[in-house]
Image: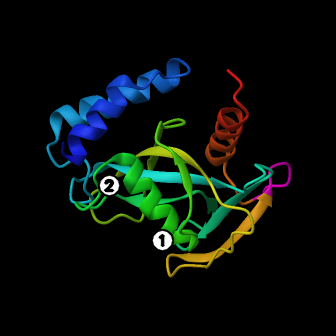
Amino acid sequence: MTLHDDAYATLTDWPAPDAEQERLRRLFVAHLDAEPDAMLRECRPDHLTGSVIIFSSDHRHVLLTLHRLAKLWLQTGGHCETSDATLADSALREGREESGIEQLAIDPVPVQLSRHEVPFFGPIQPAHHLDVPNVAVAPPGAQHVISDESDDLAWFDLDALSTATDQEVRDLIAAATTRLRGRP
């Protein structure tokens, strides 16, 4: 199975939690239908990406990266690579690369979908990342390491996020927290 096939199966089977997420799910699947290279950054102007919101082992803190270009605190994530077997593998690889934490436990089922404009992604505008976020949990005592892609990396209490965290990331954290606590 190819990465494209995995993304198609994952998104076709994913039970969207509400009408807006269902609209995005259909948009992502249509993009996969139309673009054989939909998983790769070379697919312009839009392509799928994988991300992961990383929680502490006690689920009380979330690890966010201060994105070098966006200047916002975001979840870890980025472009899929041809070496990624699945969307979850892509998210996990990005989480490990950007956090320096190797032993992340990932839920392979996406938590929610996001389509966001990427104003710094070259000459074809508007360009969008069709992001498929997953949830991961770090082991007890995990020590993070700032990557070259970040200005900073920090653990935030769920009730004390930086003001430089946008609403989309706040919504992702809320959905991921609900997933971790097993509430419908």
Q: Furthest-top residue in view? A: 19
Residue situated in front as seen by the camera: 138 or 164: 138
User: Is 126 positioned to the left or the right of 3 in the image?
Assistant: right
| Marks 1 and 2 in Cβ contact (< 8 Å) | no
Q: Position of residue 168 (x, y in %)?
A: 61, 43
Identify the mark at residue 125; answer none if there is no mark.
Answer: 2
In three-dimensional space, the C-alpha distance between marks 1 and 2, rounded to whole angstroms, equals: 28 Å
**Residue at which label 1 appears:** 97
Could you tell me the amino acid type at mark 1? Glu
Q: Position of residue 99 (x, y in %)?
A: 58, 70
Q: Is residue 162 visible?
A: no
Looking at the rendered structure, the secondary structure element under dot 2 is loop
- Image quadrant assignment for residue 91: bottom left
Residue located at (66% from left, 51% from top): 166
Nearest the eye: 102 or 91: 102
Residue 35, picture quadrant: top left
Instruction: Residue at 50% x, 76% y: name it.
Output: 149
Where residue 48 appears, as percent x and y from the top left, is: 33, 47
Which of the 4 image quadrants contains residue 181?
A: top right
Residue type at mark 2: give it.
Gln
What range is drawn magenta here? 157-163
* Mark nearer the N terminus (1 vs 2): 1
Foreground label between 1 and 2: 1
Is label 1 in a helix, a strand or a loop?
Answer: helix
Which residue is depicted at the point 69% across and 74% down? 143
Does residue 68 sit above or below 155 in this rendering? Answer: below
Q: Percent position (x, y) of residue 184? A: 67, 20
